[in-house]
Amino acid sequence: MTIRKTIDCLIAATCLAAGAELFHNDRDFAAIARVRDLRIYRP
């Protein structure tokens, strides 16, 4: 798995540290959520 943008990693790391949900439309975050406990907001 390759994350295409460094900023996506920084955003995901911030959400993981804060325990926040992430509202997104980017496949990189879905990939990160498969290997980490990144909470994705699903309306």
Image (cartoon, grey):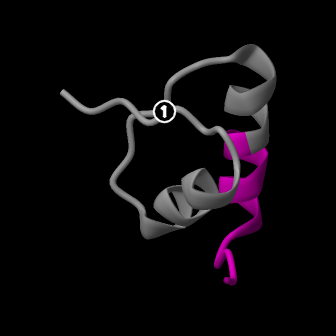
- Apparent side of residue 10 relative to residue 33 in the rendered image (left or right): right
Residue 9 locus on image (x, y percent): 74, 55
Q: Was residue 11 drawn as part of the magenta stretch in this picture?
A: yes
Q: Amino acid at mark 1?
A: Leu
Residue 19 locus on image (x, y percent): 68, 17
What is the magenta range?
1-12
- Residue 32's place in the image compared with 5, above or below, is above
- Residue 1's place in the image compared with 31, above or below, is below
- Residue 37's place in the image compared with 20, above or below, is below
Quarter of the view holding residue 18: top right
- Apparent side of residue 35 relative to residue 33 in the rendered image (left or right): right
Between 26 and 36, the one lying in front of the other is 36
Residue at x 65%, y 56% (from the top left corner): 8
- Apparent side of residue 30 relative to residue 23 in the rendered image (left or right): right
Q: Which quadrant of the rendered structure holds the C terminus?
A: top left
Q: Was residue 5 drawn as part of the magenta stretch in this picture?
A: yes
Judging by the rendered image, the residue that carries numbered circle 1 is 22
Q: Which quadrant of the rendered structure holds the N terminus?
A: bottom right
Q: Outermost residue toward the left? A: 43
Quarter of the view holding residue 17: top right
Quarter of the view holding residue 40: top left
* Number of numbered labels in the structure image: 1
Residue at x 64%, y 79% (from the top left corner): 4
Residue 37 locus on image (x, y percent): 65, 38
